[in-house]
Image (cartoon, helix red, strand yellow):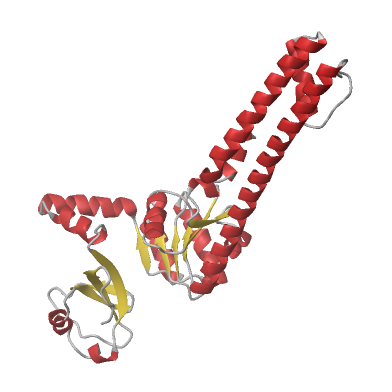
Amino acid sequence: MIALFVRIIGAGHRKHIMILLASALACVLIGAWLFSLTQGISFGRGVYWAITTATTVGYGDVTPHNGIGEVIASATMLTTIPLLASVFALATGATAAAGLRRILAMREHEDEGHRLVIGMDGPVPAIVEELAKAGEHVVLVADVDQATVGDDVHVVKGDPTQVHVLRAAHPERAIQALITGADDGDVLVSTVLLRRLAPELEIIALVKSASVSEALRELGVTRTLSPAGLVAHTVAKSLEAPHAADLLSQLVDSDEHSLSEVTAEVSAIGRPLSAIRDERAGLVLGIVHNGRFSMGIGADPVIAEGDSLLLAEPIGAKRHA
């Protein structure tokens, strides 16, 4: 119970609460010791009296029998009771404030759109952390406690294969969803439910099986990834070209540039990808046409209406294509 209490309150309040609790404990022990000396009872009996007095229970089976005992009882009540009251007031305020922050955060997500992450398997903790660092509004649907991910991520706790749990995350207001699961079956179930709740939502799924990837494509999920497969391909390419891993690392983990996918402007439509690359200061990695990415190697695709460009641009650069 104490561990749960400490996790609920914020770190900023824990120090003050611990000081108050330590002070209250000291008053109880000192009061018990003085009461046992002046009333002729054992120290254990004195502790029992001090606890019932400090908690305002006061059974009346142990009472002061002289003036000094009454003074000690008064002092114990006047110090310990306010200290304990302050502890509960501070804890209650901290808990209410934390709850209010989460509610306000969820409203902010609803107003501006959020990244929806379903499941807490595999690389998800690291993904959620990186999204939060980038300032993205992240809503995590998983059977985890809020304290395990921090206040920057809003947690909808529950089984992500249950429709009422997914509904609580407001997927219809999300701008993108990443689905993971303990196994591919959970991913498939969550995808089916999410498609029902938000038919137009862009979904990325992490799966292991090629057959499940095919089933997801039939549900309109064109972007499926296999973390194990990505690692295997990266290692293989690193063996072929020793610095290939360095290239990938700099692309996805750099403080100097950011990756972005932007819709091609009207002025770019009908022009070859090479022409756009020549004009841009940043790096045009490729083109996205009908949901498929192409680097334009061996061919020079012409940009069509609705296509997007994948860019690597300096941090703070104006994003346009």
Identified at 27% across, 67% down, the residue is: 259
Q: Quadrant of the C terminus?
A: bottom left
Q: Is residue 50 visible?
A: yes
183 above or below 70?
Answer: below
Q: Position of residue 85 (x, y in %)?
A: 71, 39
Q: Is residue 1 left or right of residue 203?
A: right
- Write the residue at 20% across / 85% down: 302
Query: In terms of depth relative to the viewer, which is nearer, 85 or 187?
Result: 85
Q: Residue at x 54, y 50 (%)?
A: 146
Q: Nearer the viewer, residue 167 or 104?
A: 104
Left or right of 242? Residue 78 is right
Residue 67 percent coordinates (x, y): 85, 18
Would residue 144 be visible to someone looking at this image?
Answer: no
Total labels drawn: 0
- Vertically, is 204 above or below 40? below
Residue 205: give x, y in percent of width and height.
41, 61
Residue nearest the viewer, comparing 44 with 229: 44
Q: Quadrant of the N terminus?
A: top right
State the image coordinates of residue 209 (x, y, percent, origin top left): 38, 55
- Viewer-closest of 319 and 275: 319
> Residue at the location (33% across, 79% down)?
290
